[in-house]
Image (spheres, rainbow, N blue to C red):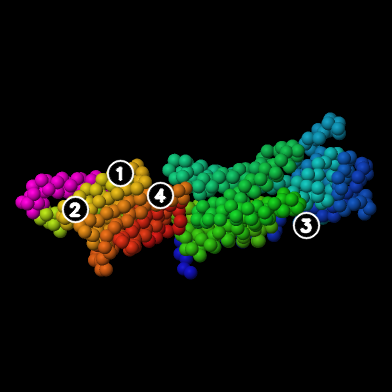
Amino acid sequence: MNYRFSYLSLGMFVAGVVIITLLSTLNQAPATYKATEVRFCYGDSLEWKNPTYSTAHWQRNFYDSSGVFWIRLVVNIAQKPQRFEPQGITVDFTGVYEVYWDGQLLGRNYNPRKTTRTVQYAPLHGLFLIPDSLGKAGRHEVALRVRYFKNYGKSPHLLESDYTDLNVGNYLALAQDNLISTAYVHIIAGVFLVIGLYYFFIFIVSNRHLRFLLFAIICMSFFALLIVEHLRFYYYYHFTFHYTRLVIIALLTLSISVLLPLFFMHRFPFKYKLRVIGAMLAMILPIWIFAQGIDPKTSYTMLVSFGVSLFLVLRAMQQRIEGSAEALLGIVVFFIAFVWLDNYDLKLFLGFGFLIIFMLLSLSIQMRKQRQEYEASLVHSSRLELEILKKNIQPHFLMNSLTSIIAWIDDDPAVGTRFIAALAEELEILIDVSSKKLIPLQREVELCESYLEVMSLRKEVNYTLYTVGVKPDDLIPPALIHTAIENGITHNHDKDGKMAFYLSFAQNRYQRHYTLMSVGVHRKTVAKKTGGTGLKYMEARLQESFPNRWQLLSKPIEGGWQTEFFIYNRETGVGSR
C-alpha cells in the first residue's frame, strides 16, 4: 500500500522522536538524591532523631497508624556541593511532620503553637534549607516525626507512592526548577486551550460534524489536565486536597482516553461505535478496580485507549483514507514516549501532546480536502448548469422543435401555438432551476410535464406522467426526473401511440426512494451518447447534493424501463450505480 506523508508530518515525527530520546537520556542523570533504607517505628521519642541511634529493629513496611510514628531514611550526597550552593530538602507528604537532618531540626509544616489534635491540615509541599555545615557529600540520616498522617494510597512504601515524595539537592534548583517548567507547561496549555476553543466555534458556527466537537473537548480536557497536574508547584494547598486533585487528574485522563477512540471513529467513518466503546470500557473497568495507585490506573487506561485508536487508524489506512498516516505517526510517538520515558508526567504530556498535534494535522488535511472538494463542486455545479441548458437548447433540438412548429402552424395553428407555449415553459423552467442545487419536487414535475408535452407534439405520441405518493415540497437536484424520462423515451418505443411514466415515492427512517417506470416496448439497441450522458449527469447531480449518500439503478424491466434513486439519511461509503 502506498501512503503519502507530508514533509510537515515527517518533520514533526522526527522532532518528536528526537525530543523523547534526549529527555530519556537526561532523565537517567537526576539532579536530586532519593531516599534509601526507609524504616518505620510507631511511638514517639526524641532519641530516635539521633543519627547514631540504631534502627535495625524498625519495620521496613508501613501500616496505618492513628498515632505518632517516625520515619528514618538515608540520603547519600554523591558529589561535593559547590561553594555558595546551599543544599535543600523537599518533602511532599500527606500529613503533619517535623523533619530532622543528622539529628538537627530543619523545620516543620505546621504551626508549633497549636496542639497536635488541632493540627490536621498542613501544606502538602515543604522546602527546607540544609545548613552548610550539614550539607556535605556523604551519608546523611533523615528523620520525620509524623504527628498525623493520611495514607490515601494504602501504600506500604510511603516515599514511593503517588502521594508522598522526598528529594535532596540544590536549594535554589529545588525552589525554581518546578516553577520554570510550570511556566512552559502553562504556555503549552494555553496553546491547546486556543485550539480547543477554535474548533469548538467551528463546530458551533459553520461545521456541525461531531469530530470537531470531540477534538475541541479533547484539547480543552488536556488543557485542564496540564493545569491541575502542575497546580502543586505554585499553589501550596493542604495535603487533604491532594487526593481530590489526583482523582480529578485520573478522571480527566479517563475522559480523554474514552474520547480519543470516539474521535477516530468519526474522523475515519466506522460503523460499530457502540461495540468498540463497550469493549474498551470492559477492559478499563478491571484496571480501575484492581490496579493500585492513580498512576498505574491512568497508565494502563491510556494503553488501552491508544491500542483501540491504533486499530481504528490502521483500518483507516487500509481503506486509504487521507490523514490516517498522520494519525498513525502520532500514536507511534505516544508509544515511544510511553516505553522510553520513566517519568509519568513526561509520558503523559509528550505522549498526549504530540498525538494531539498530529490529530490537528490530520484534521487540517481533511479540512483542506473538503475546501478543495467544495471549490471543485462549485466549478462542477457551473458545468452542470451549462449541461442542462446545452442538452436542451442545442441546435438540433431547436431545429427539430422549430421544424415541428412550422409544420403545425401550417397544418393546425392552434396546435402550433400550444407547441410554442410548451417549449417556452420548458426553457423558462430550465433557465430558472439550472443554477440551483436543489429544487422542490413540484417544480421538477412541472418541468417534466412541459417536456412531455413538447415531445408529444413533436413525435405525435401521447406521453403521460403519473405520480404516486410524491411530496411536492421534497427537495431533489434539478432535471433529475427530467433526465430519467429522457432515458425512458430513449430506451423504449411507444405502444399504440402511447407511453406512460409512473413516478412513485417511498420513505422510511433510513432513506428516500424514487422510482420512475416507463411503460413501452424496450429497444434492443440504444445510442451510446444519449444514454451515457444522461446517467453521468444524474450521478454527478446526486453526488453534488448528497455526497456518498445515494444509489442509482437504471435497468430494463418487463414492459418497459425502470430508474430508481435512493437517497440515504447518513453516509454509506460511496455513491454507486
Which residue lies under the disc numbered 2?
456
Where residue 425 sits, quadrant-wise, is top left
Q: Is residue 274 left or right of residue 531?
A: right
Q: Nearer the viewer, mark 2 or mark 3?
A: 2
* Residue type highlighted by circle 2: Ser
Give whichever of 200, 572 is nearer the camera: 572
Element type where label 1 sits in the image: helix
Residue that badge 4 annotates: 506
Residue highlighted by disc 1: 442
Q: Quadrant of residue 471?
A: top left
> SS class of the residue under badge 4?
strand
The circle drawn on residue 78 is: 3
Q: Position of residue 309 (x, y in %)?
A: 58, 57
Query: Picture quarter containing residue 66?
Result: top right
Amino acid type shown at disc 1: Gln
Q: Main secondary structure of the magenta part?
A: helix
Can you say whether 378 is above or below 3 in the image?
A: above
Q: Are marks 2 and 3 in contact (CB under 8 Å)?
A: no
Alpha carbon distance from label 1 to label 4: 16 Å
Q: Secondary structure at mark 3?
A: loop
Q: The C terminus appears in which quarter of the rendering?
A: bottom left
Please state which of residues 150 and 250 is positioned toward the viewer in this rendering.
Answer: 250
Give the residue at x 7% y 51%. Answer: 411
Residue that appears at 78% across and 44% down: 152
User: Which badge, 3 or 1, is on the more N-terminal residue?
Assistant: 3
Image depth: mark 1 or mark 2 in front: 2
Of callouts 2 and 3, which one flags the residue occurring earlier in the amino acid sequence?
3
Residue sitting at 30 percent across and 61 percent down? 560
| Mark 4 nearby-residue class (10 Å; few <14, some 14–19, many ≥20) | some
Instruction: Give the farthest residue toward the front.
Output: 496
Task: Magenta stretch: give its range.
Answer: 405-434
Spatial CA distance of label 2 from label 3 is: 104 Å
